[in-house]
Amino acid sequence: MDPAARTGATPSTTGLDRRTVLKAGALAGAAVGTSALAGRSAVAGADVAVFQHGVASGDPMPDRVILWTRVTPAPDAVPGSGRGAPVAVSWEISLDPGFSQVVRSGSVVTDAGRDHTVKFDCTGLAPDRWYHYRFRALGQTSPTGRTRTAPADGALPSTGRWRIGVVSCSNWEAGYFSGYRHLEARGDLDAIVELGDYIYEYGRGEYTGKFGAVRPHDPPHDIVTLADYRIRLAQYRTDPDLQSLHAHVPWICTWDDHELANDNWSDGAENHHPHQGPFSDRKAASSQAYFEWMPVRPESLRDGGHLYRRLRWGSLAEISMLDLRSYRTEGPDRFDGHAIDVTGTMTGAAQFDWLARGLSSSTARWNVIGNSVMITPVLLPPLEPQTTAALTELLGVPREGITYNPDQWDGYAGERRRLMEVIRAAGTRNTVFLTGDIHTSWANEVPFEPANYPGAGVGAIEFVTPSITSNNIDDMVNLPEGNPLSQTAQGALTQVNRHVRWVDLDRHGFTVVEFTTDFAHADYWALVAREDPASGAYPIASWRVRHGTDQLEPAGLLP
């Protein structure tokens, strides 16, 4: 079937009024439907939509979930401005979308010191339950959000499954976020796992798509200051498809590099320059804005706080969300074939010990790791120069044929080896890495010993999700999807790296992953055209690993 004919979208059955969400996401000054707003306040001003940036929820637990919104109290109180008076915001959460069964309510005060964002842990909820929530401020009512709690510890989900959308790498200038729309339209997801590069830090025109910038970044320059990061995050949150998906299900998020700066490590980055000031100031600014704007449970990295955390989905799954940027040492030079770093760390000692203890003691059926960069080792095969150049840019592997990618786990081979030994020593089965970062789709078996695959055994499975919009191979060589260069590269990669069971280097999209007691399953979906805000989507591959086997097999599409 012609991919353009396969939209992949079905009407939502959740009861969430998507048009309300879209209207609430309009830019300041745009018309906002009366169905979304309860009225205009003289305090807020007749032309100000208070809830311009929508609502969101995240980090579901059996008795609680994070709720989020932002208020705009005055025309000049825009994100990053530092302007606007404190605002009291009331909230309520209900078992039904009509709010006739309110179970919790309260109020909070926000101000310019936190960019007028509202984020709190809504506690006292029942496990394994769907809820609806909303906010009120300055005479206006937010769109209604929909969220849920995790099953009770030790219990199987009432549905018998955990079905999630997996996304990463959404570059505003490179395309529209149609993938989010298709995930929202399904109506069957329990959560979204977002693996980083939620925003991009570049100035206008610095990193665009094949057809140039489809919409310009704000602010127009590289973002460096706290105000810059707030403005950029706010711009992304005006996208109607992103707003709608945030309002539809809880998100479980981590960051990669572009929330701060390209290829960053604990005290530097590839594209941070002296004229931009101390890197520590930039890092603090980006993390503060991130914690203000994202529905994640940590509030900051200060006073021992950390983004890495662990959530359970009853007895079925435990997900460890990693932070692979804040504590990593600078990686080896990708162009130095002798600089194989066996002492460097990607996780930092405390996070590694936390991860190792969790994997060793887990009682969950599936041990899931939210992993922002690929852990599977990749050897770059000999290819013609143009394809090699594109792979070099995308994967970070030098043209000279060095066998590791220094920004991914390949650059920290010693630590990867230690992690795989933890899995082997503990006898941990059913370990699944969910990965983003490289803008392409992969289904991998992660070997204990890459040189002795498959004889030495497989320690984990890795599902790598494609980018929502960020460039991949066909964009870099400026050819259509499925071109001969990409096809040749895909075949060579799987031939040289036999543990890479499947790879697609050209298509943008998302992944739907389901865990049951019997299997973990991934459906890979592609967008017809990322530059089209109404793009359709279609399935391109499905892979499954059965409980206790650590072996991938092709599968049919999830029902």
Image (tube, helix red, strand yellow):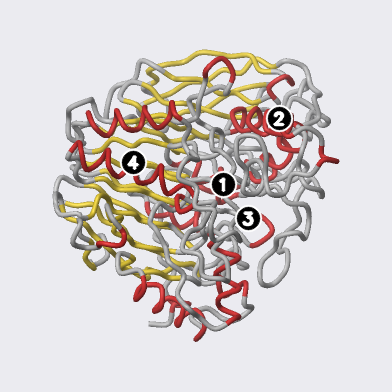
Mark 1 or 2: the one toward you: 1
- At label 4, counting other C-alpha atoms closer than 10 Å, the crowd grade (few under 14, some 14-19, many 20 or more) is some
Separation of marks 4 and 2 at Cα, in angstroms = 29 Å
Separation of marks 4 and 3 at Cα, in angstroms = 31 Å
Residue behind mark 2: 280
Element type where label 3 sits in the image: loop
> Which of the marked residues, 2 or 3, is nearer the chain's N terminus?
3
The amino acid pointed to by label 1 is Gly
The amino acid pointed to by label 3 is Asn
Residue behind mark 1: 331
> Which of the marked residues, 4 or 3, is nearer the chain's N terminus?
3
> Which of the marked residues, 1 or 3, is nearer the chain's N terminus?
3
> In the image, residue 498 lies at what x, y percent?
30, 69
Dots 4, 1 in contact, CB < 8 A: no
Residue behind mark 3: 171
Residue under the point 41% across and 78% down: 492
Dots 1, 2 in contact, CB < 8 A: no
Dots 4, 2 in contact, CB < 8 A: no
388 left or right of 495 in image: right
303, above or below 325, in the image: above
Residue under the point 40% across and 66% down: 8
Q: How many marks?
A: 4
